[in-house]
Amino acid sequence: MAAAYLEKLNDQQKQAVEHGVSGERGDASRPLLIIAGAGSGKTNTLAHRVAHLIVNGADPRRILLMTFSRRAAAEMARRVERICAKVFGTSGSAMSDALTWAGTFHGIGARLLRIYAEQIGVDPDFTIHDREDSADLMNLARHELGFSKTENRFPTKGTCLSIYSRVVNSETPLDEVLRAFYPWVSEWQAQLRELFAAYVEAKQAQNVLDYDDLLLYWAQMVADPVLAEEIGGRFDHVLVDEYQDTNRLQSSVLLALKPEGRGLTVVGDDAQSIYSFRAATVRNILDFPKSFTPEADVITLDRNYRSTQPILAAANGVIDLARERFTKNLWTDRQSSERPRLLTVADEADQARYIAERVLENRESGMTLKQQAVLFRTSSHSGPLEVELTRRNIPFVKFGGLKFLDSAHVKDLLAILRFSQNPRDRVAGFRTMQMLPGVGPQTAGKILDAIAADPEPLAALAEIPAPPRSGEDWAAFASLMEGLRKGSSGWPAEIGWARQWYEPHLDRIHEDADTRKADLLQLEQIAAGYPSRERFLTELTLDPPDATSDQAGTPLLDEDYLILSTIHSAKGQEWRSVFMLNVVDGCIPSDLGAGSTHELEEERRLLYVGMTRARDSLTLIIPQRFFTGGQHAQGDRHVFASRSRFIPVTLLQFFETGSWPVVGPRATERAGERQVRIDVAARMRSMWK
Ligand code: ATP
Ligand code: MG
């Protein structure tokens, strides 16, 4: 008889959970692929499988669990904990706490690299560059090689980085990548080769790694048979969620960890593959079974537990027309008479007002804010809504949207910490040095050159005579760096120390220094949630925390708040009610792509991913006048939008502005109804006070 905690699962799910678990050390040996549609319980099944392995004696510290985000990893650990608690009583949490190797591919890569760095000739104090830092470094290399002169129209730093990244992640030669994705820059092939060589050399000299390196170095580690065995030998079980969004490099590190597929389980849905712009390839999931002899076992799930039948029918209607797909249509027994809504409103302001009012109305009828989400194609699309929500005091959290991380003063403080961790990091070094009065790029460059040659660069810094005009500041700076090097004050006190040194600089430069200081305090609060400077810098770079509407910036953990998210970041999640913004052509599908069939198909899957997040209620909104912010050569403008070509109109219920009683300026003319709405909003506001 199956264990009690497996009772709720259907037969296919149970089969996936129990696959190969013999009872002794949870020795699930044969590789397994679970391929199934949205909401069919893939993640849930994976969590049960982890718990089942632990219950059967697997050591949680030897389980590697890779998910799409840190949030997803934490959620998975929570589910495992719940199940373990049922079986073991109170020791359940200890079981899942020991699940220490749960995270993203990049995060896990960074951790393994710190452990094994020296064995592959990398200094373990490496710092990690985010996309912007990487583009800056690429730009430096472009300048040094003289490729950046405007008249020769050499590709921008961003394009150069994208090309480089695609070559690395898809393990495809440069000429092929150019031919397939960047035909208009093919003439620069020789220069690009030279540029990429210089970029790689600069990274090595400075001991910095970009995102791609985390995977590339990992691949290099496991290319060495001895290291591969050692690293692979750390883990008895390796489980991967959202496998459809891994790229070639990720699948090759995975296969190198477990060449025979022992203890390997991957889970995914080809219809939800939405990261091909980062070289993810759905082939990984399709080719998985054939990577082993004998082939991996495959289990499919076809019952959807998430959405009502009309929502699922509409989502299936979108994906049915896809050119190529492998997973079958899903079914559900969650009947409902409510079809998804397709609502046309006048413009984005109208859209924001509509959502705010509906969200409050839902809350009035018992749906918490947390059970509702607003999804959009591009982060900037939520701007008008954020304004409206703030005006009405409706709390919200925007996934991955911690905007203030992009602001100059926050980057400055982070640069100081990064520089102290790795003084060879030139992007951080330039930024830090130029905070000193009288130090410009030239002096900064000279100082950085001088210390880079020293085996103890920060100690060498103290020996350098103060540059003119920065006398006292220099001494304070040198002692800050010395303190950070020794790590004497410990984490998170270090960040407070760096902030205090930095603040007078802010006062000198900015009139709004006080608001900026508040951001820095907020950063310090966030920092306190991480165990060390190194982990803080690594994880902030790889997976920034979510933004909250609360000015104090403390996460609203116990409170209720609405979720705002890009469709990409909403992957794997679900809400009772989902609103999708700007479901218009040009937005989804986006007109930023080159318009190839391939790209269009990915936009179709993106809409499918968004729609399948909804459990009970789904509303797609079409603003008729749509603002395209600076995406076009002619600058900002309004366009008259038409609904997305992917919408299966027969499966939705239509509303126009005005036919939905509460929305928009025209609706406000109906005085009686408007009055009611205002009352509701005011009542809700007073509840949060
Ligand atoms: P996605 O493709 O979006 O990642 P998924 O396949 O991973 O979805 P889950 O998130 O695991 O699906 O599950 C979707 C919902 O269905 C969850 O609310 C989960 O609790 C519920 N669910 C899964 N299996 C069952 C089951 N056997 N009985 C009841 N509810 C279930
Ligand atoms: Mg999932």
Image (cartoon, rainbow, N blue to C red):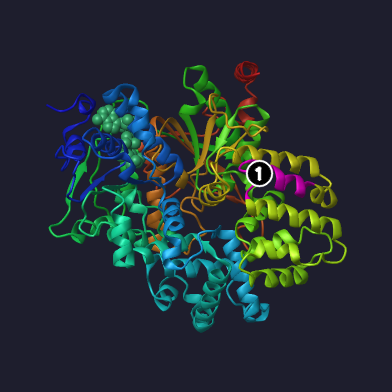
Res 345 visible:
yes
Q: Estimate the x, y position of residue 166 in percent, counting from the top left.
A: 44, 67
Question: Is 354 placed left or right of 269 in the picture?
Answer: right
Can you tell me which quadrant of the image ligand 2 is in? top left
Compared to residue 215, the image places residue 298 above or below, namely above
Res. 617 image quadrant: top left
610 and 246: which is toward the camera: 246
Question: Is 250 placed left or right of 453 in the picture?
Answer: left
Whether residue 189 appears in magenta in the rendering, the answer is no
Residue at image mark 1: 489
241 and 120: which is toward the camera: 120
Part of the protein shown in magenta = 487-503
Q: Estimate the x, y position of residue 421 in percent, counting from the top left.
A: 60, 56
Badge 1 local density, few (<14 within 10 Å), some, or many (20+)?
Answer: few
What's under tag 1, amino acid-wise? Answer: Ser
Whether residue 488 appears in magenta in the rendering, the answer is yes
Compared to residue 602, the image places residue 515 above or below, namely above
Q: Estimate the x, y position of residue 666 in percent, counting from the top left.
A: 62, 30
567 and 346: which is toward the camera: 567
425 and 450: which is toward the camera: 450
Compared to residue 563, the image places residue 475 above or below, namely below
Q: Estimate the x, y position of residue 473 in percent, counting from the top left.
A: 82, 56
